Amino acid sequence: MDQNVTVLIVEDEGIVALELQESLQNEGFDVVAIVDNGPEALEVIKKEDIDIVLLDINIKGAWDGIETAAQLKKQKNVPFIYVTAYADSNTFERAKATMPSAYLVKPFRVNDLRKAIDLAMFHFTQQQENFQLAREKLNKKENAELDGILHFNNAIFIKQNYKYNKVGYDDILFLKADGNYTYIQTANKKHIVKYSLQNVIDIFNADNFIRVHRSFAINMNHLTSFNENAIFINEEEIPIGRNYKEVFMQLFRQL
């Protein structure tokens, strides 16, 4: 299943939090949790796959939003945005020291929040080591600009209609080459990106994606069955190329 960008809201005003959740969901984001204090936010970060955190500065408990951000960064390198009514210079300077992705002063427009999240995800993924390695490989091969597909942890973000949509590695069944384009097939959707099949495999940099044909690479975690000439992922039949068969078979050990 394709995944939306996941959001944690840290806000102590219930009505504000629910309005924020509704606005985000209408924009296609997935609000995983709403909490009103720092320690609970830390517990969510530990247990859930969170892509971005929206933090009010004035929240319940001993930690304010700024201290909460500092504690979250110790647990996981995740981008966060302050959404607050505090616009004074002292608060802003404290907040700036934690290196947030953005600082939005209430009230703000939903469109401004969406743009802030998109920019935060874009800049954050650019900073990741795997993304840098992938970009270097692409520059060497095609001098291509990597602005349509981003990589972070076990997922990619594909740019469509001015928004980066998350696709988890575990959800991808196989990749199919079509000239200079590659189709990324999940169980219920097909994405297309303007990169060669090998470029996409390099971006993924994941051991479970194996090339089995000049036009196909599969996610071994979704392999259903195979024979001498073909591989099956659910009902999809994928040919095994002669030059790839030996490497594919070496992945298996006989009992």
Image (tube, rainbow, N blue to C red):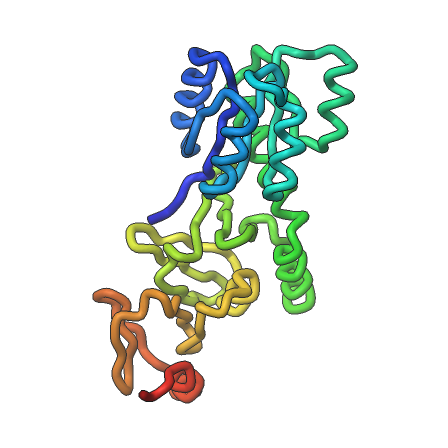
Q: Residue placed at 42% from the left, 86% from the top? A: 250
**How far across and down, in percent of the image, does residue 135 sit?**
65, 58
Residue at left offset 50%, top offset 15%: 12
The percent coordinates of residue 45 (x first, y second) are 51, 38
Q: Where 148 falls versus 81 (above or below)?
A: below
Left or right for 37, reference 32: right
Total label count? 0
- Which residue is more in the foreground, 118 or 97? 97
The quadrant in which the C terminus is found is bottom left
Above or below, 174 relative to 227: above
User: 92 or 5: which is nearer to us?
Assistant: 92
The quadrant holding residue 242 is: bottom left
| 9 over 75 or under it: above or below | above
Quarter of the rendering containing residue 118: top right
Residue at the spot x=63%, y=63% of the render?
Answer: 138
The answer to whether 223 appears left or right of 129 in the picture is left
